[in-house]
Amino acid sequence: MAAREYGQYCGVTRALELVGERWALLIVRDLLVGPRRYGELATGLPRIPSNILAARLKELQAAGVLRRVPHSRTVVYELTPYGRELEPVVLALGAWGFKAMGEPRAEQVITPDSMTMALRTAFRSEVASALPPTAYMAHLGPAALHVRVDGAALTVARREARADLVFSAGPDIRRLVSGELSADRAIAAGVVQVLRGSDDLVGRFADTFHLAA
Amino acid sequence: MAAREYGQYCGVTRALELVGERWALLIVRDLLVGPRRYGELATGLPRIPSNILAARLKELQAAGVLRRVPHSRTVVYELTPYGRELEPVVLALGAWGFKAMGEPRAEQVITPDSMTMALRTAFRSEVASALPPTAYMAHLGPAALHVRVDGAALTVARREARADLVFSAGPDIRRLVSGELSADRAIAAGVVQVLRGSDDLVGRFADTFHLAA
DNA sequence: CGGGATCCCTTAGGATACTG
DNA sequence: CAGTATCCTAAGGGATCCCG
């Protein structure tokens, strides 16, 4: 038996053999946002050693989780349909880990792709269905995300675009999303800075994106 | 920063820092079935080195996932409420990994706790709600499980007890649960051996417990 | 005998430099 | 830009031993 196998005939075990190695699910997390080039993955995972990234990409390809696709004189990595089925796993992990996030530390970075997946984790489609379509432009540290909520559909894009509410916030936005801070208090405390649009829309944002703490 | 941290402020990252180490989620899987002693965990995870089991238990305790509870001149480990919230993660992993399970290999074991969690993963409460309460006695390799389905409620116990259907099966029961084999064909092929009760109840079992392959 | 701790060795992973 | 190559540390595997 291969040394890294668990020696059990069990779905959890099999899953962990395929995507349980260090860094693997973080690569999947970023690829759930969209296809990425090697360098983009390396940028989104600043602490991953290059040899490990290369090794994981090969393993995940062999496992049928992702695909190497030639793309205009370079290569992109994209999830296979089977790889995309890991989304519930990543979302469940994100929701669980959210509760254990303390205060951000100086050396911790926030990446656009991780924020995008965090928004997907926090998205409450039932709540959104009852609200009018709304576009937000969220400046979250280095990530500028255009967030469009239309009924039960959520799209997050990494670009500037027209929005009903334009705001910026730091890691403390976690306290708004968890409900620890009301929208009013978040604005008053400077956790959220409204750059354009009505303050009321911050409340709508907090209703739409919520995660228990 | 601790060497094993990922350096990102992100829920997925935090979760993987807490339960992403090798073996950790398998310990959680077994504890989701019920409190277990050190030796029981070691038996359910035959290939885990003793020092690793001891290390993981300490780490998971420090992470607030489990608790060490004195219990009649010995100790049991049980999940905290926060640890029990990992159930969706384990079930999602189990469902995903199920699809990648090939044929069982000789050195792969089946443990009662992993089978119990597999049944929970496959349980379709919507289907069960429309069926009469049913008790099954399932002999799956080394695991003798009493499975009681009553409306949307499922209980799996590790003991012999009265049942409407008593059957035994090997790892190939996977082909029944995935729908690859109908109940009739599973019986005809000897994948499922009915020891007592009506063959029809095998079909009910397959309706109640289903996982896509 | 259950519940670990210790030892030694192998291998995965981290840091950094280098190449097609 | 997209990876390899190298060197080193630390974690995991396996067996054994210990202690109440």
Image: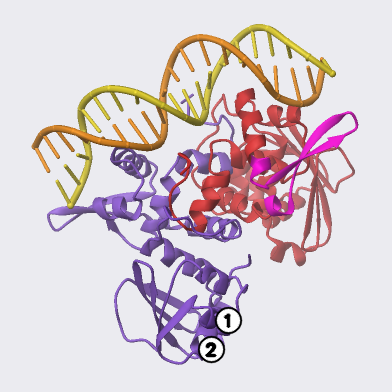
Chain colours: A purple, B red, C orange, D yellow
Q: Quadrant of the C terminus of chain A?
A: bottom right
Q: CA distance from mark 1 to mark 2?
A: 22 Å
Q: Where's residue A200, x and y in %?
A: 52, 90
Residue B151 in view? yes
Quadrant of res B140: top right
The secondary element bearing badge 2 is classed as loop
Q: Residue at x 52, y 52 (%)?
A: B14
- Disc 2: CA contacts within 10 A as few (<14), some (14-19) or many (>=20): some
Instruction: Write the residue at 47% across / 69% down.
Output: A119
Q: Which residue is mark 2?
A: A131
Q: For the point 64% across and 23% down, which residue is it? A: B50
Subunit ID for the residue under disc 2: A
Residue A47: % across, % down: 36, 46
**Is B156 on the left or on the right of C17, as rendered?**
right
Q: Mark 1 or mark 2, which is nearer to you?
A: 1
Secondary-structure class at tag 1: helix
Q: Is residue B6 above or below residue B72?
A: below
According to the image, label 1 marks what residue?
A185
Residue B167: horizontal and vertical position, in percent? 76, 40
B65 in magenta: yes
What's the amino acid at mark 1? Arg
Place of residue A132 in the rendered image (x, y in percent of width and height, measured from the top left): 49, 91
- Find residue B76 and name its label: none
Query: Is A39 above or below relative to B3?
Result: below
- The segment highlighted magenta reads B60-84
Left or right, B194 with respect to A176, comes to right
Label 2 amino acid? Answer: Leu
